[in-house]
Amino acid sequence: MQLLLFVLLSALCVLRIPAVVKVRESRASWLASVFGLAALFVLGTVTPLAVIDVYLGGINVTNLLQSIFALLAIFFFNDSVRRLADVPAIRWTYYAPLLSIPIMVVGFALIENKAPTAADFIVPRMGQLATAAYSGTYMLALLFTVLRIIYMLRHKARGLYATFSAGLLVVAAACSCHLVYVTLFHFSPWHAIAQAIGSWFDRLFYAGLTITAAGWLILVLSKQFPRCRRWLPDALWLTAVRIRFGCGQSRIIPALDLLNETLENGVYKSFIMLRNHERRNPTTFPEPVQRRLGQVEAKLELAVLV
């Protein structure tokens, strides 16, 4: 499940890069995917946990980093949803989750015997008050932010947006399970019941995030697919023609233009450059190329009218 989530977030991160450069509102969602990837990486999803933690002293600093990165991912996702739902930023609710980070750092520093590196770092140290404070603060901040996102989406919980709410409800259930585990284990004698409840955290948490990330990815693709279907074949064909006829300072420039421009702008730029190349040279393009250029020109004119 963690590897699937890593793949989904990687796809989101790559697909959102063009929008991040051009649209300010897209940066929060992109940062959410970046911090989500960072959290999964230090969790040992790609590189073994021991290999990462050994460079940080071998005392499970990776666990602290994973908590901070995951909290930042949810925080920026919250900001993205706030913009989507057009909800004004209320300062105390907006920044409250970030105030938990220094508390988590202090709690982690006070935990005794933090070595050796272990994936279940929290469980054997739950008897310490510092561990309960560190882990409980992290889960409380996550739960607060997730519930706030669900509340903001209450009027948009249809179609793909419903996947956000459904996935986040599962994440909220996971956070609640962990908070119950921390409370019962540390403040009651019912350790077995606490561990049974706490064992559901990983299953629910990553399942919920995977559902949310999948819905997010489908939403991004659904918005981009019609545009790609309309312009991508022309963009690729025009780039190939520019390379074939040496239209540009080098054979690499046309491909770079395709990456640096939006699809529509890339098609328009390539079309103009090919027409200018034709005017500057005595020879004309072959008939099939001329016919396809005419079709592209008609499509561009229609796009301007629309």
Image (spheres, helix red, strand yellow):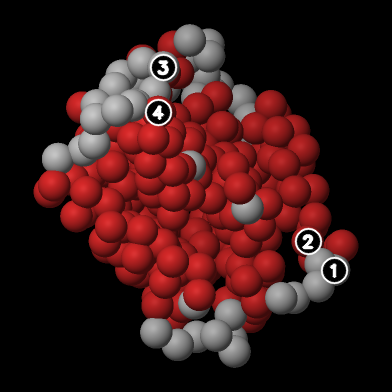
Give whichever of 82, 59 is nearer the camera.
82
Amino acid on which the number 3 mark rests in the picture: Gln
Residue annotated with mark 1: 90
Q: CA distance from mark 1 to mark 2?
A: 6 Å
Q: Are marks 4 and 1 in contact (CB under 8 Å)?
A: no
Q: Amino acid at mark 4?
A: Arg
- Say which element carries label 1: loop
Residues at discs 2 and 4 in contact (Cβ within 8 Å):
no
Asked if the residues shown at circle 1 and circle 2 are in contact, with their CB atoms under 8 angstroms apart, the answer is yes
Q: Which residue is disc 3 drawn over?
A: 249
Q: Is residue 224 above or below residue 16?
A: below
* Residue 105 position in % (x across, y down): 70, 33
Question: What residue is drawn where x is 69% and y is 27%?
Answer: 109
Residue 222, image x and y in percent? 35, 69
Left or right of residue 48, residue 279 in this image: right
Residue 59, compared with residue 81, is above or below; it is above
- Name which of mark 3 and mark 4 comes first in the sequence: 3
Counting residues from the start of the chain, the first of labels 3 and 1 encountered is 1
Q: Which residue is mark 2?
A: 94
For numbered disc 2, what is the local secondary structure? helix
Whether label 3 touches label 2, CB < 8 Å: no
Q: Quadrant of residue 241?
A: top left
Q: What whole-number distance in Å separates the C-alpha atoms at marks 4 and 1?
A: 60 Å
Q: Nearer the viewer, mark 3 or mark 4?
A: 4
The Cα atoms of the two marked residues, 3 and 4, are separated by 15 Å
Picture coordinates of residue 250, whole percent (x, y): 36, 16
Q: Is residue 153 above or below residue 115?
A: below
Foreground: disc 2 or disc 4: 4
* Residue bearing mark 4: 280
